[in-house]
Structure formats: structure tokens, C-alpha cells
Amino acid sequence: MRRLGLGIALIVIFLLTAAMTAVRYVGYQLAGLPFSPFDLYDWLVRSGAGLWLSLVEFLTAFFTGRGQNLATAATTTEWVLSLLLFFVIALIVGLIFYLFVGRRRVLPDGIDGITIGAVFGVPMLLVSLFAGQSLTAPILIIVWILALFLLWGIALSYSFRRLMRPIPTTAVPAQTDENGEMQPVDPDEAARLDRRHFLFQLGASTAAVTAVGATAGTLLAKNADTNRALRPFPVADAEFMARQGGLLDNFRRFAIVNYPPGKPEESQVVTLGAEYPDRNYVSVWLGEGSPIVVYENLETAMSAYRTDDSESAVLWLDK
């Protein structure tokens, strides 16, 4: 069995994780299926993990200081931290598998791949089921998440097996030299060429999947944002009334609207909210199963939805 270097193992783990993440993002945008990095991020925020919340606040302030508005900075922070954490976990799980295979000194098989895929996937499944916001049926969530993680584990096991399997000397064909004479090929050199060829194939295929998935997911996300912006917001939505009414009895409802500079007649409602005169905060509800977001004051809430190309204003719904 050939020795697999740590650097090559890390490259393989990263490539497979990137491809899986891109496919998962397409499912998230196309069918509302769970996106494990986001679910993991939300779970840590909701659990109140001090270090995680401090990191979120630090990065949000960092991006805000670079000219982004609050909403854009919060989105950027979510993307950076969720993907970073997910890839770190994937690398840790993959390295555990790498150390296990190397210590056992037996080529990994499909059962090993299914096992390591389950080790990675089951905790992510529990996070998505209990902390995720997907409205998809639980059975579909279970199938979707486990299928992708098991495929990741099987692909990882196959890649390690392919890179670690020995090449018998007798299987190495001879080559013709410049004089036309047959010369035996060095088995070590043949093994290196075989490994490079496989890594090239793996890199090309995973890069293609990652690029196509990321592009498709981005286009789907932009299309969803456009449709959401063009759809009238239900001002008198019963779910909004129920959510806000359960917080405090004393509040005033409002809508934040955006419009092109100097054209208030083209106002578009972007979110609903409530101001609490007896408390030092306002809350904003984005709809479609979104949690209620709390801001320090009304100006802070408005700044979160103000962009460089639009102005924001408040439309009071209660007299």
C-alpha cells in the first residue's frame, strides 16, 4: 500500500467538500432544501455561544466599516462564517478518516466510506431538523442530507483507495527509448504519474461540479430576490399580527419602504416591523418563515435596508 501524504489528503477532502456544498446550495435555492452551513450557523447563533456571537459581531462590524450597509454586512458574515466552519468540520472528519486508514494499513472500501459519511452527516442532519428553517417535509430532508453526505464519504474512500493502492511491477509496461529499444519503467515513477493523473481528473471533475453548482445557485438566488421584490407585501398578514401581538401589547406597526432617490412615488415595501414605545428596540419581520429580527432603534433598522441606489422611509400602519 502506497503512503498517502497529508497535503494530498487535504486537497482531496477540500475538493469533494466544495463539490458537495455547491450541489447542496442548488437544492437550497431550487427546492428550499436545507443548506447545512447556514443551518449550522443559525444553530450556533440561537444557542447563544458566546465566542461565536462575538465573532459574528466582529465580522459584521468589520464589513460595515468597509462601506457595506448592515443587511449586506450581516449576509456576508453569514456566508463567510458558515462556509468556514463547515469546511473546517469537513477537514477534521476527513483527517480522522485519513489517520484511521493509515494506521490500519488496509485499503478503504465502500463500507468505510458509508461509515465516515454517516459520522459527518448524522450530526448535520440533526442540526437541520431541529434548528433549520426549511419547510420541506422531514422525510425529504433526511433523504437529501444523508444521500449527499454518504456520497461524500464513498467518494472520499474511493479517492483514498485509488491513491493508496500499490502498482505491481509486472503491471508496468515497458517503453521504447530513443534508440528503439524496450526499457522497463521505474515502478515508483509510474506510481507518481498514476497519482498525478487521478488527482488531475478529480480536480477537474470536482471543479466543474463546484463551478456549475455555484453559478446555478447564484442565478436562482438572484431570480428569487427579484420575484420577492416584485411581489406585493401583505400588510395585513395574519401571521405577522400573531407574531407581533405575542411579544408586547404596546407597539406601533410600520413598513419600511425603499425608493429611487427623488422618486418616492416608486416606493416598494421591503419589510414590516413594530416599534415599542416602552422598550429601547424595534423588531422587523421579513416574512416566509423568517425569524423576527431585533434592532436597537428605528434608524438602525432603516439603515439595514438602505442601499447606495435607494432611499428608505417609514410608513406607519397604526395611528
Image (cartoon, rainbow, N blue to C red):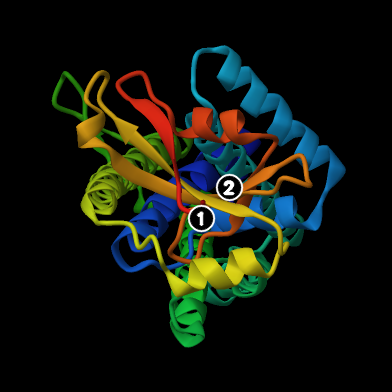
Closer-to-camera residue (30/287): 287
- What is the crowding at mark 1: few (fewer than 14 residues within 10 Å), some, or many (at least 20)? some
Whether residue 57 is visible to the viewer of this picture, yes or no, is yes
| SS for dot 1 | loop
20 relative position to 46: left or right: left
> Is residue 128 visible in this depiction of the protein?
no
Q: Residues within 10 Å of mark 2 (few under 14, many from 20)?
A: some
Which residue in the protein does label 2 denote?
2
Decide which of tag 2 and tag 1 comes sooner along the chain. Answer: 2
Instruction: Give the amino acid type for the residue marked by disc 1 in the picture.
Output: Arg
| Residue 168 at x, y percent in the picture | 45, 53
Amino acid, disc 2: Arg
Tell whether label 1 touches label 2 (CB within 8 Å): yes
Q: Find disc 1 in the rendering and name its residue.
A: 165
User: Where is residue 217 shown, x and y percent of the image?
Assistant: 30, 49
Between 169 and 292, the residue placed more toward the observer is 292
In front of the other: 306 or 110: 306
> With respect to residue 249, does 74 lie above or below?
above
Q: Secondary structure at mark 2?
A: loop
